[in-house]
Image: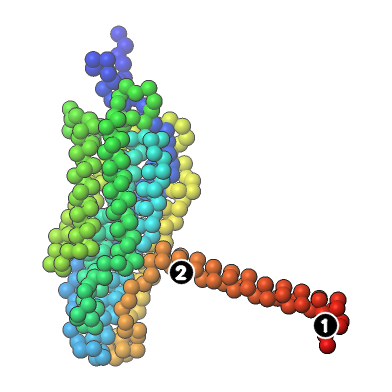
């Protein structure tokens, strides 16, 4: 007697039969690797700075204007920039991925929506790890210059991007929780369930178990993110640990849910490389190049100090200011382009007026007198 591959209990399938259609732009290898590796880079850099080296304990102790002050301040600036490598790019791509998922509305299946949730969680993890270190480093660097100024300034470019991401991530979480209420193994249309093998305990009630996982990890992540923005310096190491602990959780869930559901997808091959996957991989390459560049600059500075002595730092730019984010830089370039276009149009208008006046004088010689 033949047995069904998917045994039924009381007329209902034991596992999902209609997962959905393939979406390479969301679940392709390039996208998943790009997000997870960038998060790993941020975590490794943060742990390196605060647990494995002396940089987390660095202070600007020398008096302003002395070689020691300039040296310590420059070194903190280098470490701060290294910690933020790739953060701006990842925040932008994370916001774009959330926007893509929300724009699909109910057309996106539960499997891909859950996968997007775990993927963009890497952005929050790496952002929290980078910011908790970056704000501390920047606070130390500015402490001697602005003792009476509230720090951090909670409306800088990087903070605004973090706020935007947190709001969108919260919206994605609520949307996923609502969509999980539609869970059905017997729905005629695809996309109302996914295979849960290895994602929850055997016999767990779905979607209750899935909703609990989403709620707990989302609250955990948002608290860590806002802690990295607003908590005092003494909480930096606990926040780093809490941020790092989320990485293996989402990495496991991302890999497991894709492995279990990929064979049951309909439509095109989800491993096909297209624009989304290529873009994510290129952005990862840009992050690695930035990391190498910042590392080499730091090594050059240290070598120059050994060669020319502590006074070398005084010849460098001493002010430690926040570099503009990619969004701010893009807006600045748009404003400049708009101003240039306006100037060109005005110049063309003046030239046209001069040509018309010259033509009128040629046509009417009596006006020349």
Residue drawn at (34%, 66%) of the image: 157
Q: Residue furthest top?
A: 1
Q: Is residue 72 visible?
A: no
The answer to which of marks 2 and 1 sits earlier in the sequence is 2
As displayed, is residue 192 above or below residue 227? Answer: above
Q: Residue furthest left?
A: 234
- Rendering coords of residue 7 (x, y %): 27, 18
Nearer to me, 93 or 70: 93
- Rendering coords of residue 262 (x, y %): 37, 35
Left or right, residue 11 beside residue 332 = left
- Rendering coords of residue 54 (x, y %): 18, 73
Residue drawn at (37%, 53%) of the image: 95
Left or right, residue 367 beside residue 349 = right
Nearer to me, 122 or 95: 95
Left or right, residue 55 beside residue 172 = left
Q: Which residue is mark 2?
A: 332
* Label 2–label 1 contact, CB within 8 A: no
Q: CA distance from mark 2 to mark 1?
A: 47 Å
Residue 90, by quadrant, is: bottom left
Residue drawn at (24%, 78%) of the image: 142
As displayed, is residue 303 above or below residue 232? Answer: below
Circle 1 packing at 10 Å, graded few (<14), some (14-19), many (20+), is: few
Circle 2 packing at 10 Å, graded few (<14), some (14-19), many (20+), is: few
Residue drawn at (20%, 48%) of the image: 219
Quadrant occupied by the N terminus: top left
Q: Is residue 113 visible?
A: yes
Q: SS at mark 2?
A: helix
Q: Which residue is mark 1?
A: 367
Q: SS at mark 1?
A: helix
Q: Which mark is residue 184?
A: none
- Rendering coords of residue 15 (x, y %): 28, 25
> Is label 2 or label 1 in front?
1
């Amino acid at each position: 007697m033949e047995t069904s591959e998917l045994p039924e209990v009381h007329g209902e399938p034991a596992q999902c039969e209609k997962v959905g259609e393939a979406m390479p732009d969301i679940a392709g290898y390039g996208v998943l690797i790009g997000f997870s590796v960038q998060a790993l880079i941020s975590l490794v850099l943060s742990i390196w700075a605060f647990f494995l080296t002396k940089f987390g304990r660095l202070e600007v102790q020398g008096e302003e204007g002395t070689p020691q002050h300039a040296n310590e301040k420059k070194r903190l600036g280098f470490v701060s920039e290294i910690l933020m490598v790739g953060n701006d790019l990842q925040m932008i791509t994370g916001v774009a991925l959330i926007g893509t998922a929300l724009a699909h509305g109910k057309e996106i299946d539960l499997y891909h929506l859950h996968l997007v949730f775990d993927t963009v969680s890497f952005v929050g993890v790496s952002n929290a790890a980078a910011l908790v270190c970056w704000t501390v480093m920047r606070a130390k660097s500015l402490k001697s210059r602005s003792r009476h100024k509230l720090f951090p300034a909670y409306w800088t470019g990087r903070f605004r991007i973090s706020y935007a991401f947190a709001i969108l991530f919260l919206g994605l979480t609520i949307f996923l929780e609502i969509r999980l209420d539609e869970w059905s193994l017997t729905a005629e249309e695809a996309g109302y369930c996914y295979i849960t093998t290895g994602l929850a305990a055997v016999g767990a009630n779905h979607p209750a178990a899935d909703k609990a996982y989403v709620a707990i990890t989302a609250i955990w992540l948002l608290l860590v993110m806002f802690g990295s923005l607003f908590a005092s310096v003494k909480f930096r190491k606990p926040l780093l640990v809490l941020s790092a602990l989320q990485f293996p959780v989402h990495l496991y869930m991302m890999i497991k849910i894709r492995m279990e559901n990929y064979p049951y997808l309909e439509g095109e091959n989800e491993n096909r490389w297209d624009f989304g996957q290529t873009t994510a991989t290129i952005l990862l390459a840009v992050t690695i190049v930035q990391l190498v560049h910042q590392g080499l600059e730091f090594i050059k500075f240290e070598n120059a100090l050994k060669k020319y002595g502590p006074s070398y730092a005084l010849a460098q730019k001493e002010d430690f200011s926040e570099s503009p984010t990619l969004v701010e830089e893009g807006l600045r370039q748009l404003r400049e382009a708009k101003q240039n276009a306006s100037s060109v149009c005005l110049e063309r208008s003046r030239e046209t007026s001069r040509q018309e006046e010259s033509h009128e004088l040629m046509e009417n010689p009596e006006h020349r007198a």
